[in-house]
Image (cartoon, grey):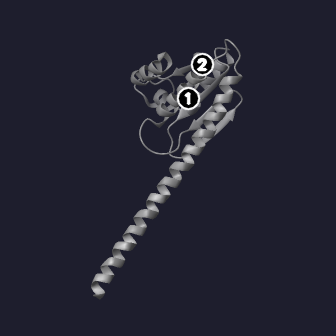
Amino acid sequence: MMASRLYHMRDLKAEVAKLKAENSRLSEKLSTLEAHFDMALLAAEDLRSLTEGEKMLVVDGWNLILGSKREASSREDLCQAVQSRIDSGEYKKAWVVFDGSKENVKVSGSLRLSYTGGDGEHRADKFICDYIRMAKYLAIDSRVDVWTNDKDFLKTVDRIKNRI
């Protein structure tokens, strides 16, 4: 009888450990979602503040640094390239989005740099697509350009923008 209680106690401890890990994972996911929502609201305000003819550039960060057709050798190089496009007047604002395990955002003038947080593949792509959908719902998606060399991702962006 003692042995069965001991086994039951081990099973319960294992279950508690499993539930603690799941709780921790879900808490982190909730935190990431809350941060995404906050970032999206701020970026939506950025987009709404643009006047007729002004545009925002949204950049798929790691794709342009690590992809097959590299546009920059580092985050700093990429941010400089994006800042040059702002300085030239081509874009009023820009948002560089990177996948990253910890959500983070930094704003410097008209340039926003953010990390998605969370885990899984293509988080930046999904985040950018959600942003394009939001802009489409507000009928201001024409103010957003996406810079990436990922052809499949660009097709998805085009589908979102051209949906009726």
Q: Earlier in the sequence, mark 1 or mark 2?
A: 1
Label 2 sits on what residue type?
A: Ala
Q: Residue furthest front?
A: 164
**Secondary-structure class at tag 2:** loop
Label annotation for residue 131: 1
Camera sees residue 73? no
The image quadrant where one finds the N terminus is bottom left
Quote the CA–CA distance across marks 1 and 2. 12 Å
Near-viewer residue (123 or 20): 20
| Residue 143, above or below 10 | above
Looking at the rendered structure, the kind of residue marked 1 is Tyr
Sort mark 1 into few (<14), some (14-19) or many (20+) by Cα contacts within 10 Å: many
Can you say whether 126 is above or below 18 in the image? above
Q: Residue at x 47, y 33 (%)?
A: 126
Q: Position of residue 148 (x, y in %)?
A: 48, 23
Residue sitting at x 71%, y 23%: 49
> Toward the viewer: 138 or 147?
138
> As displayed, is residue 163 above or below residue 39?
above
Looking at this view, name the residue that lies furthest to the bottom. 2
Instruction: Judge whether residue 140 can be spotted in this image.
Output: yes
Residue 16 relative to residue 134: left or right: left
Number of marks: 2
Residue corresponding to mark 2:
139
Q: Residue at coordinates 42% horizontally, 20% vertically from top-left?
A: 155
